Image (spheres, rainbow, N blue to C red):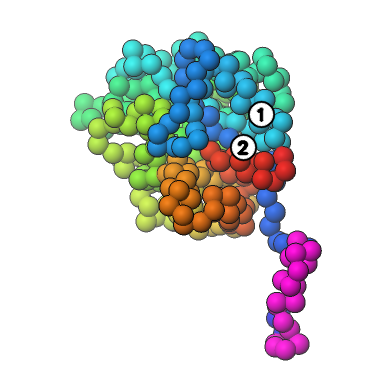
C-alpha cells in the first residue's frame, strides 16, 4: 500500500546513509559466497589464467592455502574444478572415477588441513576428463549418450564422496542423474553428503574462460546444446528443477548468472527450495573487462551484481570474485 505525494515522499528514507542502511531489504554477507577454485598437479604452482585476470590454477598446496583463506574470510564453501593432464584424458573420461585423481587428492588435502571448517563442493561431469571435451560418453553418432553417462557419473560421485566431498554438484545435465547419484550415495552410507544440482544449466557463450581453465575448450568439438538448455526456455527450467527436487536434490543451481535472474526468481517462487546461482567465468571476465575499460569501478560493478542475485532469491552465489567480495564485506 502506497500513499500519495506529498504525504508520501519515498526520498525521505533515502536521505542519509544511516537511513538507507536501516531500510535496506537485501544484505549480502561472506556466508553467501561459494568460491570456485581450479586445481592443477605439481607443487608450488600458481598459473595465472589469461581470460580470467586475477584467477589462478593452484597445485594442492595452493588449494589448501585458498581453503584456509576462505575460512579466514568467512566464505563457507569452496568448489573444485580440476585441470587434468592431457595424458589422463580419454575418449571415456575414465580418470573421473579414479579414487586417486587430482580432484580426490584436492578434496583429501582440504579435508586433512581444514577438517569440517569449510565445505567442499565437487563438480560431477566428464568434460575435464574426456579427450573430446563433452560432458559424457559419445554414442556411435557422436551424441552424448545419456544412460551410460549416468552410470559413470554415479561412480564419479562415489569416489568424490569417499574422498570427503560435502556437496556433490552434477553439472552435466543428463536426465535422471540426480536420482541415480542419490540412491548410490545412500547405499554407500553417505547419508549426509548433499547434492546441489546444476538443475537449470543453459547452453551458454559465457563458459568460454572456464573451458580454457580446465583445458577442455580447445578439445571441444561442436557444442553442448543436446544436453544443456536453450536460453529461451523458462518453463522447461522449472520442469528440470521439479525433477531434480523429486530425485533428491538438496539445493538447485541456475547457471549462468546475471542473464538468468528471472529463472532464479521463478524457481524460488514456485518451489521455495534453496537456490544458488553461478556467476560464471564469462560474467567474471565481463566485470574485469568493464573495470579495465573504465566503464565503472570493479568493486561497485561486482557488489551491485551480487546483491541482485540475493534480491532475486538466491541463498548464495558461486563467484570467482568471492575473496574480493568477502573482503569488501569485512570478512
Ligand atoms: C562443466 C562445467 C562448466 C562450467 C562449470 N562446470 C562448463 C561447461 O558446461 O561447458 C562453467 C563454469 C564457468 O563458466 O565459470 N560441466
Q: Is residue 51 above or below residue 270?
A: above
Point 69% across, 46% down: residue: 329
Left/right of residue 38 with respect to residue 31 in the rendered view = left
Which range of residues does the magenta coloring cover?
4-21
- Front-most of residues 317 and 64: 64
- Front-most of residues 286 and 80: 286
- Judge the density around disc 2: few (<14), some (14-19), many (≥20) Cα neighbours within 10 Å: many
Q: Seen from this angle, which residue lies furthest left?
A: 141
Please provide percent x and percent y for residue 308: 58, 56
Please provide percent x and percent y for residue 298: 54, 49
Which quadrant: the N terminus? Answer: bottom right
Q: Which residue is disc 2 drawn over?
A: 323
Residue 154 circle label: none
Q: Quadrant of residue 138?
A: top left
- Front-most of residues 172 and 112: 112
| Residue 176 can be seen in this image | no
Left/right of residue 136 with respect to residue 302 in the rendered view = left
Q: Is residue 68 above or below residue 108?
A: below
- Judge the density around disc 1: few (<14), some (14-19), many (≥20) Cα neighbours within 10 Å: few
Q: Which residue is disc 1 drawn over?
A: 69
Please provide percent x and percent y for residue 121: 58, 29
Q: Secondary structure at mark 2?
A: helix
Q: Are marks 2 and 1 in contact (CB under 8 Å)?
A: yes
Q: Quadrant of residue 327?
A: top right
Which quadrant: the C terminus? Answer: top right
Q: Earlier in the sequence, mark 2 or mark 1?
A: 1
Point 61% across, 15% down: residue: 109
Please provide percent x and percent y for residue 248: 57, 36
Point 28% across, 39% down: residue: 223
| Residue 232 can be seen in this image | yes
Left/right of residue 29 with respect to residue 219 in the rendered view = right
Amino acid at each position: 500500500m502506497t500513499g500519495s505525494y506529498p504525504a508520501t515522499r519515498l526520498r525521505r528514507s533515502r536521505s542519509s546513509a544511516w537511513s538507507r542502511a536501516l531500510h535496506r531489504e537485501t544484505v549480502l554477507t561472506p556466508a553467501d559466497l561459494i568460491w570456485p577454485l581450479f586445481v592443477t598437479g605439481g607443487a608450488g604452482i600458481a598459473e595465472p589464467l589469461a581470460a580470467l585476470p586475477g584467477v589462478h590454477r593452484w597445485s594442492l598446496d595452493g588449494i589448501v592455502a585458498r581453503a584456509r583463506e576462505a575460512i579466514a574470510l568467512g566464505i563457507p564453501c569452496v568448489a573444485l574444478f580440476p585441470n587434468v593432464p592431457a595424458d589422463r584424458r580419454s575418449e571415456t573420461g575414465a580418470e573421473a572415477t579414479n579414487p586417486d585423481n587430482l580432484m580426490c587428492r584436492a578434496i583429501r588435502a582440504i579435508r586433512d588441513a581444514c577438517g569440517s571448517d569449510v565445505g567442499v563442493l565437487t563438480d560431477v561431469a566428464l568434460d575435464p576428463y574426456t579427450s573430446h571435451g563433452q560432458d559424457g560418453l559419445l554414442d556411435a553418432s557422436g551424441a552424448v549418450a545419456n544412460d551410460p553417462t549416468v552410470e559413470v557419473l554415479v561412480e564419479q560421485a562415489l569416489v568424490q564422496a569417499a574422498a570427503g566431498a560435502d556437496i556433490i554438484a552434477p553439472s552435466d545435465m543428463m536426465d535422471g542423474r540426480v536420482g541415480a547419484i542419490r540412491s548410490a550415495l545412500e547405499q554407500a552410507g553417505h547419508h549426509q553428503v548433499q547434492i546441489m544440482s546444476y538443475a537449470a544449466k543453459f547452453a551458454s557463450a559465457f563458459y568460454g574462460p572456464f573451458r580454457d581453465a580446465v583445458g577442455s575448450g580447445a578439445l571441444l568439438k561442436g557444442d553442448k546444446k543436446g544436453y544443456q538448455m536453450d536460453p529461451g526456455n523458462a518453463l522447461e527450467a522449472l520442469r528440470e528443477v521439479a525433477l531434480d527436487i523429486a530425485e533428491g536434490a538438496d539445493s538447485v543451481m541456475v547457471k549462468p548468472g546475471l542473464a538468468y535472474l528471472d529463472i532464479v526468481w521463478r524457481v524460488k517462487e514456485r518451489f521455495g527450495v534453496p537456490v544458488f546461482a553461478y556467476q560464471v567465468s564469462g560474467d567474471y571476465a565481463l566485470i574485469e573487462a568493464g573495470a579495465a575499460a573504465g566503464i565503472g569501478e570493479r568493486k561497485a560493478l561486482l557488489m551491485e551484481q551480487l546483491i541482485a542475485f540475493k534480491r532475486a532469491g538466491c541463498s548464495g552465489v558461486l563467484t570467482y570474485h568471492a575473496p574480493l567480495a568477502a573482503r569488501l564485506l569485512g570478512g
